[in-house]
């Protein structure tokens, strides 16, 4: 009799657990705790310096500090407006990117012009949509956007016919003793087509400078002359680096000096530095919201320099002859709270991973299935209006923290991207009165799905272009 009372609650607990499993109630292991206070923007005193000079060499890898652009723009008067504007711009970016993907595939991969561990920082505070690093070019340090969906690296140059405002002085070719213009009759000029999607612009004089045109998915562009100069990734030199010297540039590049192309063509920085780093690079994207958070861009494949908390799981890169510059993967499934989502369109598999897109996009039928399962598991919270591309929203202003279902992307080879808790919900309003599922639907079933940077936060994402594999591992991003 003495032992009967303590056992009774224990037996009830077992009974409850049995009934929970039988009725499809998911256990706590399939959920993550999200502190809503972590999304509250903290105004910083003074104007922070976004141009990080931090870098180091470790076990043969070059490590650059990486930051989100938000860290660089100083005080933000209306953070709610900033969050909402980011979604509107992301929608424009994806719509035009999808249009370019269709056009490029239809034209056989050509578009006509008439149509090191480096600190990695988020680009929001530079008023761009991407993450930024600092590189050395010629005699100068330049802060550039990091983009896996681009190939040609370029910076704004003096004299400039039409340039957007940037935080640093423009690159001055005449001040660099190692600067060399590329001529129209050179092999380098002919190679630019693979890296810019456009044919080089040359007149009848083949000894004139080789001009390039790069158009981006959001309508931005850079035009100028092709050149070579000495590049430094941290303390690692890359000699005779081929890049664009932009004389006419427009778009959402904000205060950055230019763009670093991490794509797959011969003119990308990955291909040009392959003798040093073996065609391998990785990054860990810091959280947008964290005050002063930084991550890293690692050039080289020595995994001993990573700080991942889970093993790296690799999946095969899918070859697409018409879209060979991009990184495609085979998506085999999506699970919410440990429950596999059922959608026929998942069988198509192909999905693009892109550091320049913010919110991940799914085919309409896949998104609807994901949304339905998420709402089944994340129930009982007051609804809120949708905003822009996000239509599954909640009013969480009465909560300091919530338990949210896990989100996993399953990929060929049993690899998976286990989305960090900060990448599942998007806070439209900082008082948490409008918090949305951070996924969006594409317009049509035949459009290409995208894994955006919001779902890549706090992950070590490893690109091995020689082995043609891509890996994911959980990591709390930090340069230190």
Image (tube, rainbow, N blue to C red):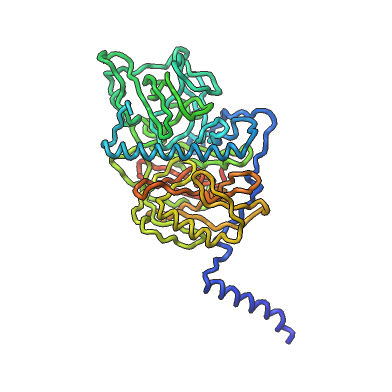
- Judging depth in this view, the residue of 35 and 261 nearest the camera is 35
Report the residue at 52% width, 48% height from top.
438
As rendered, which of 63 and 216 lies closer to the eye?
Answer: 216
Name the quarter where the C terminus is drawn: top right
From the viewer's perspective, tell me whether residue 88 is left or right of residue 442: right
Location of residue 444 in the rendering, given as x and y in whole percent from the top left corner: 37, 48
Residue 171 shows in the view: yes
Name the image quarter holding the N terminus.
Answer: bottom right
- Position in image of residue 96 (x %, y %): 40, 37
Vertical position of residue 218 compared to residue 32: above or below: above
Please report the residue visible at 53 percent of the width from the left and 18 percent of the height from the top.
Answer: 169
| Residue that extends furthest to the right in the rendered view of this protein | 2
In the image, residue 405 sits, relative to residue 474, either above or below, namely below
Residue 369 falls in image quadrant: bottom left
Residue 35 coordinates in the image, percent (x, y): 64, 51
Residue extending furthest toward the bottom: 1
């Amino acid at each position: 009799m003495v032992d009967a009372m303590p056992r009774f609650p224990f037996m009830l607990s077992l009974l409850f657990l049995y009934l929970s499993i039988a009725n499809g109630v998911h256990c706590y292991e399939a959920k993550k705790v999200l502190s809503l206070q972590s999304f509250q923007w903290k105004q910083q005193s003074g104007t922070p310096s976004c141009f990080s000079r931090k870098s180091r060499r470790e076990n043969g890898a070059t490590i650059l500090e990486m930051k989100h652009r938000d860290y660089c723009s100083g005080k933000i008067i209306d953070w709610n407006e900033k969050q909402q504007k980011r979604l509107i711009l992301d929608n424009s970016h994806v719509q035009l990117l999808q249009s370019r993907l269709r056009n490029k595939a239809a034209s056989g991969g050509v578009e006509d012009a008439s149509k090191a561990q480096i600190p990695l920082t988020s680009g929001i505070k530079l008023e761009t949509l991407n993450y930024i690093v600092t590189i050395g070019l010629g005699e100068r340090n330049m802060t550039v956007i990091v983009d896996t969906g681009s190939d040609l690296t370029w910076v704004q140059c003096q004299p400039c016919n039409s340039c957007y405002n940037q935080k640093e002085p423009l690159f001055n070719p005449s001040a660099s003793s190692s600067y060399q213009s590329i001529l129209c009759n050179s092999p380098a000029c002919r190679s630019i087509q693979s890296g810019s999607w456009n044919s080089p612009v040359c007149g009848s004089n083949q000894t004139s400078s080789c001009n390039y045109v790069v158009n981006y998915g959001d309508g931005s562009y850079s035009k100028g002359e092709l050149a070579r100069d000495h590049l430094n990734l941290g303390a690692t030199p890359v000699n005779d680096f081929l890049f664009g010297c932009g004389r006419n540039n427009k778009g959402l590049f904000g205060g950055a000096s230019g763009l670093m192309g991490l794509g797959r063509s011969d003119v990308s920085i990955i291909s040009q530095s392959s003798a040093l780093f073996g065609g391998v690079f990785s990054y860990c994207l810091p959280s947008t919201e964290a005050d002063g958070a930084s991550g890293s861009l690692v050039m080289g494949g020595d995994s001993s320099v990573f700080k991942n908390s889970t093993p790296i799981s690799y999946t095969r890169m899918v070859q697409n002859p018409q879209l060979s510059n991009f990184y495609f993967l085979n998506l085999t499934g999506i699970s919410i709270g440990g429950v596999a989502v059922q959608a026929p369109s998942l069988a198509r598999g192909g999905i693009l991973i892109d550091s320049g897109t913010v919110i991940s996009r799914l085919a309409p039928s896949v998104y609807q299935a994901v949304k339905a399962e998420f709402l089944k598991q994340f129930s009982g919270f007051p609804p809120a209006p949708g905003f822009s591309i996000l239509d599954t929203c909640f009013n969480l202003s009465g909560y300091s923290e919530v338990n949210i279902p896990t989100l996993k992307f399953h990929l060929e080879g049993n690899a998976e991207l286990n989305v960090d808790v900060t990448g599942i919900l998007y806070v439209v309003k900082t008082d948490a009165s409008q918090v949305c599922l951070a996924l969006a639907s594409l317009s049509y079933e035949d459009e290409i799905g995208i894994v955006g940077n919001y779902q890549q936060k706090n992950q070590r994402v490893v690109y091995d272009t020689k082995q043609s594999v891509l890996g994911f591992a959980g990591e709390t991003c930090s340069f230190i």
